[in-house]
Image (tube, rainbow, N blue to C red):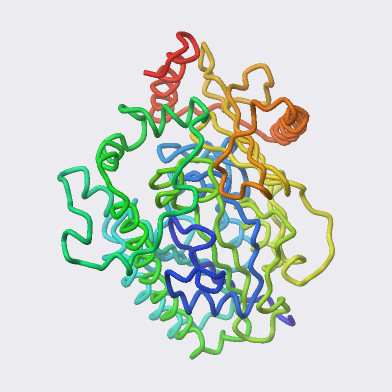
Amino acid sequence: MSKRPNILFINTDQHSWNAISAYGNPYLHTPNIDLLHQNGTSFKKSYCTDPVCAAARSSWATGLYTSETGVPFNGGQLHTEIPDIGQVLKTGGYRVYHCGKWHVPGSNVRESFEVLYYGGHDIGAGGAAYYDSASTHAVADFLTNYDGNEPFYLQIGYVDPHDVCEYLHNHEEKHIPNPIEQGILTEDELPPLPENFDYDDRETVLHRVCRRVDDALIHARILKAVRNWDELHWRYLRWNYYRFIEKVDAEIGRTLSLLRQTSFYDNTLIIFSADHGEACGSHQMFQKFSLYEESVRVPFIISCLGDEISIGKDRFDDTHFVSGVDLFPTICDYAGVDQIEDVQGMSLRPLAEGKDVSWREYAYIESNYWGRAIVTDEYKYVTEYKPKTMEDFVSPGPDAEQLGLAQLFDKHNDPWETENLADAPEYQEVIKTCREKLLTQESQLNRQQIVHQGPQRIISNWGKRLREYWEHGKIK
């Protein structure tokens, strides 16, 4: 690579790791994401830092975990002194552009980037039907007219398949018959229920209070609706989800086709990933917010359609644990730009080039402020922190005494996470080892107090609900 490459970061929203046809999923067709895989390296052990939009995207933008960024949930605010990827690359001599969804509250995308398209109102949760094609048109205009001498960094935030959430919200308002009753599809056209539709209900208190109880903290109205669903409703949810993915794949295809027609074709690095996944019926769940695999495991592909950038082609990396914090240092590495100190991630460039380098032994994930997970080759350990009696608005940990309930899954014998082994005597040493990894990881984080009143209110209100269990022994 004789000169610094252009860098194109394409991201989708709420896209689970295995919802790609090149990865063997027979229920959808994604020829354009498949093309990126065929011309690059796919990381099969890729995990988001936190399974919700703003939190995960704050890690993309900074290379930090969400307990460090100030965005541990959608209502957070990025700490003001933390620079984002646009600011860092701009200082390093790149022209930096943004198009589509950003959703990093506290960071003004229009100050950090030259914005190609961000809507009349900032793009928020949904609206892919309006925003995604407009984003592609804006990118088309950019690619066909860019004549700058400096290399460019362009990030495209597509909204789909997030609009599966809008499909779910429809069910809050009324009862909708299943698709067979409506005459929309035949049963043979529907994908099957996931193998882990049934689940072990020995979950953390945090998860149950957030997602399972009648007055759940997150999307209680949708929860009430889906309790009346039959099997065909759940299968139709999956069918719709795959259609939203095919829609965004078509947009990606238009962008790649345009890139092929430019002089940037050979020297443009393309990174593809998603902020988090979608449960889509697994564990009888919908949307994200949980630490189950469907929500936290995401695609991550490093690709180049030309030949000027050295990348392994049509290759799976199923060895290395990749995290959303790795995006920032990977981009800086390819750009030849010095990254800021104390970034948690590592550059994936040597892995994409097939080099043997020292790497992390597990993935670390946070969720809903108090939730934590460690994923190793053999096990997934999920736990939670009990809320503080007197909240100081500093994300909890490391504190072994304040850990609550746990889940442990054997990844080899139970890849669908259907049997919680946390109470089994023969697995207590495994629990102890995973807990030590968690506390070691957390001791390396640089947490700061959350000072904005909005996030503080969320923490206080949610913490009150959680303390009702820990103080009275029951979930209300």
Above/below status of 140 relative to 101: below
What residue appears at the point 39 percent right and 24 percent down from the top-left corner?
A: 457
Residue 255 picture quarter:
bottom left
What residue appears at the point 66 percent right and 71 percent down from the top-left corner?
A: 41
Q: Residue 318, position in %: x, y?
A: 70, 62
What residue appears at the point 41 percent right and 19 percent down from the top-left corner?
A: 475
State the count of labels.
Answer: 0
Which is more toward the observer, 306 or 399? 399
Above/below status of 408 relative to 274: above
Work out which quarter of the rendered image holds the C terminus and state it. top left
Residue 120 picture quarter:
bottom left
Q: Residue 155, position in %: x, y?
A: 49, 66
Residue at far top of view = 472
What residue appears at the point 17 percent right and 51 percent down from the top-left corner?
A: 176
Work out which quarter of the rendered image holds the N terminus and state it. bottom right
> Position of 470 compared to 137: left or right?
right
Which is more toward the observer, 62 or 38? 38
Q: Residue 105, position in %: x, y?
A: 43, 44
Residue 153 picture quarter:
bottom right
